Amino acid sequence: MLDAIWSSSFGSHDNCARRNRCNECGRPRARSETATGGYIGGHVGGGYGRTSFSNPYGPSIYGDVVDTPVFLAGGQIGYNWQKNGWVFGVELDASGAVSNGTNTCLAASGFIVSANCKAGPNVFATGTGRVGYAFGALGHTPAYLKGGVAWQNNRGDVVNNFEGGSPQEKAHFDYGRLGATIGLGVEQALTPAWSVKAEYDYLHFGGPSVATPPTEQNPPFAILPANTTGLSSNYHIGKIGLNYHFGSDPWTAQWSDAPLYAKAPAGAPIRCSRCRPQAGWFIPVPALSSLGFSLWNLTNSIRFSMPKSQNA
């Protein structure tokens, strides 16, 4: 009888979990892995870079490095795969840039007319792979590392300084160049469809050889013919961006049971309206009625089975 009372009173706690009502009534349900999928978005950012010029006339006494502040805006598209808390992905992005810098260059000595070198990238593009881990109870905050190939279009001029009344010689360059990039970032899901990210990227490009104009040496007076200079560029870029994740309603602001990037940890309570949080023993109301009825029957059985008193 007591076994029946126990089963009717406390067994419903497990029955609720078996009916999959909510996590509070039993073990946590398995979570679907919903980070897998594509996304598209936009970004803005800024930073600084340096373009270095080699001197064909010998080591420079100063200059040859042009600092280039960078402001950019663009878009990205990518795809993520999620395995437990780990998130893997690929991404393509492209940015238009506003950047310009100038500095003295090709100053091999005080007897050679030096030049002003101007440089500034106007386009960046990258193709990267990403690996990260989703933090937080529901995995809404993945942090990641990234690396891959990069491309830039860099343009500028090499303009001779004052040449004693002669027209200033100059050479223009405008070239695209492949390079490499590495970076890191963090993304925060706002809703099932929208997330924001903050990211740092380092880009490196080994530059081509570009033409330099002819220049003068004095004394002794001589015309130095046109030559070439090798360029290399490095950039440090910070970005903030907004992504839309395909397959989600862009107007939905509430989460479903499933987390965006990861499974909920074992034992994490999920609130629902059909079960109350359990702080100690849980005895459903129907079980209380069953328990009272069983105790009444047990009392009557004991009373009627006792031997009657001789004096009765």
Image (cartoon, grey):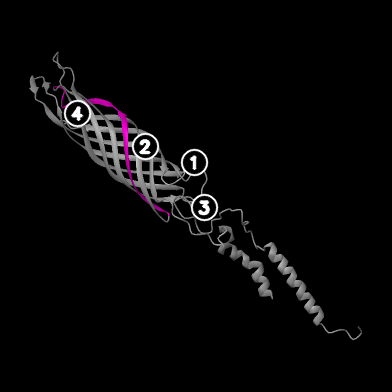
Residue at which label 1 appears: 251
Q: Could you say which disc has been placed on residue 173 in the image?
A: 4
Label whose residue precedes the other's in the sequence (2 or 3)? 2
Prevailing secondary structure of the magenta residues: strand
Real-space CA distance between mark 2 and mark 3, rounded to the nearest whole angstrom: 34 Å
Say if mark 1 contacts mark 3, CB within 8 Å: no
For the residues carrying marks 2 and 1, which lies nearer the camera in this image? 1
Real-space CA distance between mark 4 and mark 3, rounded to the nearest whole angstrom: 56 Å
Secondary structure found at label 2: strand
Asked if residue 57 shows in the view, the reply is no
The residue that appears at 45% across and 42% down in the rendered structure is 194
The residue that appears at 31% across and 45% down in the rendered structure is 128
Q: Amino acid at mark 3?
A: Asp
In the depicted structure, whether residue 260 falls above or below residue 13: above
Q: Amino acid at mark 1?
A: Trp
Please tell me how crowded label 3 is: few (under 14), some (14-19), or many (20+) other residues with Cα within 10 Å: some
- In the rendered structure, the answer to whether residue 65 lies left or right of residue 198 reads left
In the depicted structure, whether residue 260 falls above or below residue 60: below
Q: Residue furthest right?
A: 311
Q: Where is the C terminus found, in terms of image quarters?
A: bottom right
Quarter-wise, where is residue 175 in the image?
A: top left
Q: Over which residues does the magenta segment extend?
A: 85-111
Task: Give residue 88's position: percent from left, percent from top.
Answer: 36, 51
Membership of 161 in magenta stretch: no
Please tell me how crowded label 2 is: few (under 14), some (14-19), or many (20+) other residues with Cα within 10 Å: many
Q: Residue furthest top?
A: 165
Residue at which label 3 appears: 257
Say if mark 4 contacts mark 1, CB within 8 Å: no
Residue at which label 2 appears: 238
